[in-house]
Image: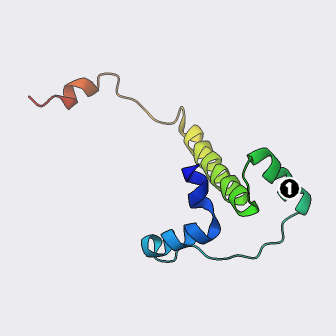
Amino acid sequence: MEKEALTHPAQSHALCEPLCENLHMATNLAIDPELLEKALAVSGEKTKTAAVTLALREFVARREQKRLRELFGKLQWDESYDYKRERSRS
């Protein structure tokens, strides 16, 4: 419930303004209404803004994961490296 209270646009803006130094901005977008309604329904969010924000976060996370997956098999590992020995303070 606490999260929902902080995601209300007026409240989140009031909290964010001193913390984020106005890094958020209002944006007008032409979004397919049917797609937006579907996103709202499947996300479980209460507002369109929250649904779009969640969708953008998930999009960014997936793209970042894709970049990491592309590295598999490209990095060379030193089999003799002992991470536990490197952690010791002796």
Image quarter of the C terminus: top left
- In the rendered image, residue 50, in percent from the top left (x then y), is placed at 68, 58
| Colour pattern of the rendering | rainbow
Query: Residue at image x 63%, y 68%?
Result: 9
Q: Residue at x 83, y 58 (%)?
A: 36
Q: Quadrant of residue 70?
A: top right
- For label 1, count other residues whose C-alpha is less than 10 Å away and answer few (under 14), some (14-19) or many (20+): few
**Number of callouts:** 1
**Residue extending farthest left:** 90
> Toward the viewer: 67 or 89?
89
The correct choice, above or below, for 32 with respect to 20 in the image is above
Residue 13 at x, y = what percent?
Answer: 56, 72
Q: Which residue is identified by label 1?
A: 37
**Which picture quadrant has residue 71?**
top right
* Residue sitting at the far right: 34
Answer above or below: position of 13 versus 37.
below
Percent position of residue 17, x then y: 49, 75
Q: Is residue 34 left or right of residue 39?
A: right
Residue 74, position as x, y percentages in the image: 51, 36
Q: Tell me which residue sits at (67%, 51%) in the image.
A: 59
| Residue drawn at 85 percent across, 51 percent down | 38
Name the element at disc 1: helix
For badge 1, the amino acid type reads Glu
Q: Is residue 29 left or right of residue 70?
A: right
